[in-house]
Amino acid sequence: MSKFKIRHITRYRYEDPVRDSANQLMLYPIRDSWQDILEHMIVITDNPMVHIHTDYFGNLVGTFTHARPHRELVIDSQLTVVTKLRQMPADNLPSDKQWEALQPLQQQMEFVDFLRQENFKALPEIQSIAEAELAKKQSPFKSAQNVSEYIYKTFEYQTGITTVETTLDEIWKLKSGVCQDFAHMLLAILRLMNIPARYVSGYIGPNKGGMRGEGATHAWVEAYIPFYGWLGLDPTNNCLVNDTHVRLAIGKNFSDVSPVKGTYRGTSTHTLDVTVTVVTEDGNTITAENNIVTPGVVTSTPHTQQNSFRRYQEMQMQQ
C-alpha cells in the first residue's frame, strides 16, 4: 500500500484578455478496490461552477465556463490517494485456452473500442512484430509483457521531440518519445494480437531506483488478460503497474483522457505552465515543471504556445 499527496497546477496566461473560456477536466482519479481517494479539491480562478458527469468509459469529467474577461486561468488540483498492492496473474492455465477466451471479446461492446485498430502506413511492419510474438505461443500475459519490454528496449525515452498529436507513423520513424508515445505503440501491437488494450492517464510516484515520468502526469496501458481482468503495463519503465501508479482516467487513446482541454474567445496566443508535485508518505518529494504537452500545443515563439484545438474553435466562431 502506498499513500501519495499530489498537486497538479495548470496555469494559462493570455497575451490579451479572453472570455467565454469553456473547459473540460479529467483530473478526478478512479475510485475502486485498488485506489482510495482520501481528499480531493480542485480550485479554479474565480471559482466557477463545475458540472461533473460520467463519460462512456466510466471516468468522472468536470466542465466549467469562465465567461468574464481574464488574462490568467489557474486550475489547481490537490489530491491525497492511497493505492493498494494487487496480485498479478497466476498464468497457470494452458496458453491456447487463454487465446481462445479472447476470441469472443471481438463481439462484445465492452471490448470493441479497445480492439479497434487505427490505420497507418507502418501497419505492416508493426503487424510483423505482433505475428512474431504470437508465433512464440506463449500466454497473453507473457506476450503482453514481451511486447512492453520490446518497446522499452527499442525506443529511446526523449522529451521535447513529440506532442500528443504525433502519429504512430512518426513515432515508429523516430523510435523515440515519451510516455504517451510508448503507450500509443503498445496499444497498437496488443490490439493487432487481439488483446484488448486501453490507454491510462495518471501519475507515478517517486521510486528509489528512479522512474521515467515520476512526479509528473504519466501514461501507460491496461491489457485484458483472460480469467484475470485488466492488467497495467508501463512500457516507459518496463514494469507491471501496481501501487506506485495513480490512475486518473481510461480511454481508447490520449484524446479520451486529456487532463485539461477547452476553448475560449479571444487571442490564441498564450503561455502554459504545468507543475506536478508528488509527495510520498515517507516524505519523499518530486516536482516536475513545464514537461506536459496538451493537445495541439506547438511552439510559436520562446515560452509562447498556440493551442490548435482552440484555434479551430475560433475559426468556427469566425465563419
Image (spheres, rainbow, N blue to C red):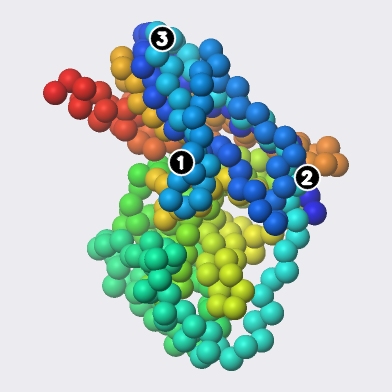
Q: Is residue 150 above or below residue 167?
A: below
Q: Secondary structure at mark 1?
A: loop
Given residues 149 and 24, the one toward you in this image is 24
Kind of element beneath mark 3: loop
Distance of mark 1 from mark 3, alpha carbons?
25 Å
Assign the N terminus to one quadrant of the image: bottom right
Q: Give percent across and percent down for residue 210.
A: 71, 50
Q: Residue at x 55, y 16 (%)?
A: 47
Q: Which mark is residue 68?
A: 3
Q: As drawn, which residue projects farthest toward the left? A: 319
Residue 22 vertical position relative to residue 130 in the rendered view, above or below: above
Residue 13's place in the image compared with 315, above or below, is above
Say whether disc 3 or disc 2 marks the residue closer to the N-terminus. Answer: 2
Question: Residue tagged by mark 1?
Answer: 258
- Left or right of 203 on screen, residue 19: left
- The three-letter amino acid code for the residue at tag 3 is Arg
Q: Earlier in the sequence, mark 1 or mark 3?
A: 3
Alpha carbon of mark 2 to alpha carbon of mark 1: how far? Answer: 24 Å
Badge 3 vs badge 2, beta-carbon distance below 8 Å? no
Res. 152 mark:
none
Q: Quadrant of residue 192?
A: bottom left
Q: Which residue is mark 2?
A: 3
Give SS at disc 2: strand
Q: Amino acid at mark 1?
A: Ser
Callout 1: 10 Å neighbours few (<14), some, many (20+)? many
Residue at the (25%, 30%) spot, across then down: 312
Of label 2 and label 1, which has the lower sequence position?
2
Residue 18 x, y percent position in the rendering: 36, 12
Distance (Cα) linking label 3 and label 2? 38 Å
Q: Is residue 198 left or right of residue 5?
A: left
Q: Between residue 174 and residue 183, name the one nearer to us.
A: 183
Q: Is residue 235 visible?
A: no
